[in-house]
Amino acid sequence: INATQHTTEPPPRYSEASLIKKLEELGIGRPSTYTAILKTLEDRDYVAIDRRKLVPQAKGRLLSAFLESFFERYVEYDFTASL
């Protein structure tokens, strides 16, 4: 019997470019709104930028958990993309 050790790693944090790419893939927003979305996330302290990566802050995590708990339908990707 050979035992091998495997570790799992979380997915890498989004950069501004990778988040914009993900928004495009999901059909959320438009090119004219991407800059405003990123600025709002940072201005409201939902995320901080550390070494070009978006790092969720306590306020952002709390808001995300609240919205997912009480307004799940409205934060689904398909619903948001259809707006």
Image (spheres, rainbow, N blue to C red):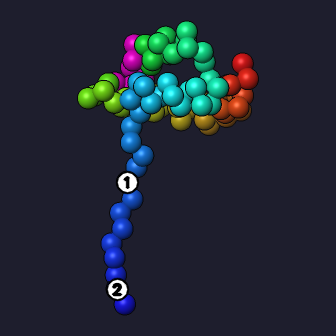
Looking at the rendering, which quadrant does residue 38 occupy? top left
**Residue marked by disc 2:** 2
Q: Which mark is residue 30?
A: none
Q: Amino acid at mark 2?
A: Asn
**Helix, strand or loop at mark 2:** loop
Image point 56% across, 27% down: which residue? 23
Q: Position of residue 68 (x, y in %)?
A: 60, 35
Q: Residues within 10 Å of mark 2 (few under 14, many from 20)?
A: few
Image point 60% across, 31% down: which residue? 25
Q: Amino acid at mark 1?
A: Glu
**In the rendered view, does 56 fall on the left or right side of 67?**
left
Q: Is residue 32 above or below residue 13?
A: above
Q: Position of residue 20 (x, y in %)?
A: 49, 24
Q: Position of residue 14 (x, y in %)?
A: 41, 33
Image point 34% across, 81% down: which residue? 3
Mark 1 or 2: in front is: 2
Image point 38% across, 42% down: which residue? 12
**Residue marked by disc 1:** 9
**Helix, strand or loop at mark 1:** loop
Identify the magenta region. Answer: 42-48
Nearer-the-camera pick, 27 or 57: 27
Whether residues under marks 1 and 2 lie with C-beta atoms below 8 angstroms apart, the answer is: no
